[in-house]
Image (cartoon, coloured by chain):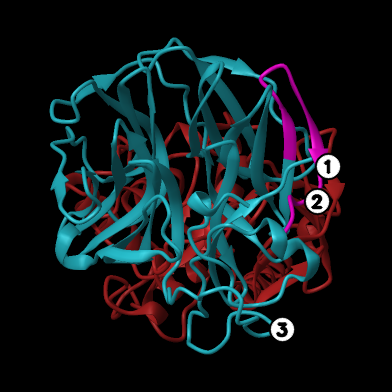
């Protein structure tokens, strides 16, 4: 393992697969040791008592975001670091802000989510250059809604979200998108696929362009655009005979790793591309209880962020 | 009870099931319904049990013989990892209620049927959902719900004039049971208020506040269910409430 890529390690045993672990942000949600097996002692633990919902390349290292509802947090791992460090808490994003995703933008990053207001949730976004200072984005608002995902392509950043018909009813009715080339001025993007009772759950930059996943109980849709402005075209989505949510994707050489959860809350993985997918097993060291919320390709490695029964994790995965 | 209490999806105490209180549930759409196991939060499943028992009682008591035996429920899923109640396993999308002889077919848009009987039965099922689930989103709510009824337990089931979902439902009830002739737009204005009062005078609901009391709203929903399954107008004798009753 490249020492420069060693960000931190799990505080528990994953058997032989531990040799692939490069990054970790795991601690039980309520304290104690995260998983059976206990700390190996060989890997420094990073105490993260909050959910991690996204991860992105960041200044040569990685940036993860998460936290609890109304209390957002961010962690960063610089190149060569042996552990993650918390870089921002609720005070940086404002109390009442919840983060749902993060995407790299140049040397910095953009995190998105929602801010709870008296009139219901409103889309929220923040940009950072150092992980510590976060600048609120001026996203145009169209009533209650949340920002769900963010990704950058060719120097432009796209935020996608969903709006609701009324503040208390969190059933998405419209997909909305905002694009920016400087991270300051955001313009609405037209032509996003209709939601049809789903919600945007995935936006990732891959070699072919931007991959957008819209997931709902009635089905899942996968769309591809070569620019942030679209046009979006429907591409083959993994087939499953029950509800499915697509949550994360990352480019791996010639293929794309796609992660999701089915209607029985089981993690599912596929390798392929817009032309087709084949199901694959959980990439080691991920296990059946791990649910991936974000993937980031970094120096030839793929790092997954997500949650499990008793905590959250960020770690490198091996894809065969 | 809020569904927005976590940044990740998932369930705290999930339950797998392919029937609700013994009634099979089938995933899909007409010509393609398949019995499948699904997952939901256990406490939400318990509410589905209460719901289906009430549905059986009212359809069996007030409906014709063709509604006496509930056979299966058609649906398009419960848990899916996305924002909102579906992502917490606390929502269920119903698209068909199949009795031994008849069905309420949300998938085919019974709420907009030219047959008033079908509309009334749709409203009866709708009302049964609203007794237990807020939010209930039906065919009048928006285009996404013209082929199913969404139920979740995000908040306490009481009537809310500020809710588009609640108001559109009340407007549809006033139109279909009392000939109110309201525009179903989800906005609670003077005409809706007057039609609501007139409806309640006509079928004898009174002395209760469905805007603040769960029990009072449940009783109001009982009126809708009884009249709906019986296919009777508000002026016909339909349901007698022991709690919210106004002799006229």
Snapshot quadrant of residue B207:
bottom left
Mark 2 and mark 1: span between their CA atoms?
Answer: 5 Å
Count up the numbered dots: 3
Circle 3 crowding by C-alpha within 10 Å: few under 14, some 14–19, many from 20: few
Using the image, tell me which numbered label, if any, was put on residue B33: 1
Q: Give the side of residue B70 with respect to residue A58, left or right.
A: right
Dot 3 falls on a residue whose secondary structure is loop
Dot 1 falls on a residue whose secondary structure is loop
Image spot of residue B228 (x, y percent): 57, 55
Question: Does residue B231 appear anywhere in the picture?
Answer: yes
Camera-nearest label, 3 or 1: 3
Residue placed at 74% from the left, 46% from the top?
Answer: B103
Circle 2 crowding by C-alpha within 10 Å: few under 14, some 14–19, many from 20: many
B51 or A246, which lies in front? Answer: A246
Are labels 2 and 1 on one chain?
A: yes
**Which residue is label 2 attached to?**
B26
Instruction: State the hue of chain B.
Output: red
Camera-nearest label, 2 or 3: 3
Label 2 with label 1: CB-CB less than 8 Å: yes
Chain letter for the part of the structure drawn in cyan: A
Mark 3 and mark 1: span between their CA atoms?
Answer: 44 Å
Q: Which residues are magenta?
A: A270-287
Image spot of residue A224 (x, y percent): 54, 18
**Which residue is label 3 attached to?**
A37
Are labels 3 and 1 on one chain?
A: no
Q: Is residue A279 magenta?
A: yes
Q: Is residue B186 magenta?
A: no
Q: Give the side of residue B220 with respect to residue A243, left or right.
A: left
Image spot of residue A78 (x, y percent): 36, 53
Snapshot quadrant of residue B91:
bottom right
Label 3 with label 1: CB-CB less than 8 Å: no
């Amino acid at each position: 393992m490249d020492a420069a890529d060693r960000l931190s390690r799990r505080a528990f045993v994953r058997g032989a697969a531990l040799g692939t672990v490069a990054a970790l942000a795991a601690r039980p949600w309520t304290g104690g040791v995260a998983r059976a097996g206990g700390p190996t002692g060989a890997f420094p633990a990073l105490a993260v008592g909050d959910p991690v919902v996204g991860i992105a390349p960041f200044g040569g290292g990685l940036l993860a975001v998460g936290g609890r509802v109304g209390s957002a947090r961010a962690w960063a791992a610089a190149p060569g670091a042996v552990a993650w460090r918390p870089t921002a808490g609720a005070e940086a994003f404002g109390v009442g802000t919840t983060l749902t995703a993060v995407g790299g933008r140049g040397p910095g990053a953009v995190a998105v989510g929602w801010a709870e207001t008296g009139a219901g949730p409103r889309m929220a976004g923040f940009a950072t250059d150092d992980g510590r200072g976060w600048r609120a984005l001026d996203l145009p608002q169209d009533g209650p809604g949340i920002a769900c995902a963010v990704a950058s392509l060719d120097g432009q950043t796209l935020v996608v979200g969903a709006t609701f018909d009324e503040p208390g009813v969190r059933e998405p009715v419209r997909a909305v998108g905002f694009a920016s080339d400087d991270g300051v001025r955001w313009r609405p993007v037209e032509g996003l696929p209709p939601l049809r009772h789903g919600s945007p759950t995935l936006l990732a930059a891959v070699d072919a362009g931007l991959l957008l996943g819209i997931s709902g109980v009635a089905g899942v849709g996968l769309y591809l655009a070569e620019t942030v402005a679209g046009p979006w075209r429907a591409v083959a989505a993994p087939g499953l005979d029950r509800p499915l949510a697509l949550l994360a994707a990352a480019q791996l050489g010639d293929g794309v790793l796609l992660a999701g959860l089915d209607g029985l809350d089981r993690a599912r993985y596929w390798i392929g591309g817009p032309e087709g997918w084949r199901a694959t097993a959980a990439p080691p060291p991920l296990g059946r209880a791990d649910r991936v919320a974000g993937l980031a390709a970094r120096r030839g490695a793929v790092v997954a962020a997500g949650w499990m029964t008793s905590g959250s994790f960020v770690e490198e995965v091996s894809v065969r | 009870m809020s569904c927005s209490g976590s940044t990740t999806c998932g369930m705290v105490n999930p339950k797998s099931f392919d029937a609700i209180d013994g009634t099979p549930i089938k995933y899909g759409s007409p010509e393609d319904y398949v019995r499948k196991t699904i997952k939901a939060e256990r406490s939400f499943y318990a509410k589905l049990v209460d719901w289906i028992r009430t549905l059986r009682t009212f359809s069996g008591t007030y409906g014709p013989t063709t509604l006496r035996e509930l056979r299966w429920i058609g649906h398009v899923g419960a848990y899916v990892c996305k924002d909102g109640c579906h992502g917490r396993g606390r929502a269920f999308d119903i698209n068909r209620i199949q009795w031994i002889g008849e069905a309420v077919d949300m998938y085919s848009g019974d709420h907009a049927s030219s047959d008033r009987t079908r509309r009334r039965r749709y409203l009866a099922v709708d009302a049964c959902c609203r007794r237990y689930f807020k939010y209930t989103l039906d065919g009048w709510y928006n285009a996404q719900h013209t082929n199913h009824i969404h139920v979740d337990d995000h908040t306490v089931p009481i009537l809310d004039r500020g809710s588009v979902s609640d108001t559109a439902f009340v407007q549809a009830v006033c139109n279909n049971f009392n000939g109110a002739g309201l525009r179903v737009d989800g906005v609670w204005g003077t005409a809706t208020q007057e039609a609501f009062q007139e409806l309640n005078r006509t079928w004898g609901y009174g002395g209760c506040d469905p805007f603040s009391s769960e029990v009072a709203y449940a009783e109001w929903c009982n009126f809708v269910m009884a009249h709906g399954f019986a296919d009777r107008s508000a002026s016909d004798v339909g349901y007698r409430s022991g709690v919210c009753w106004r002799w006229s």
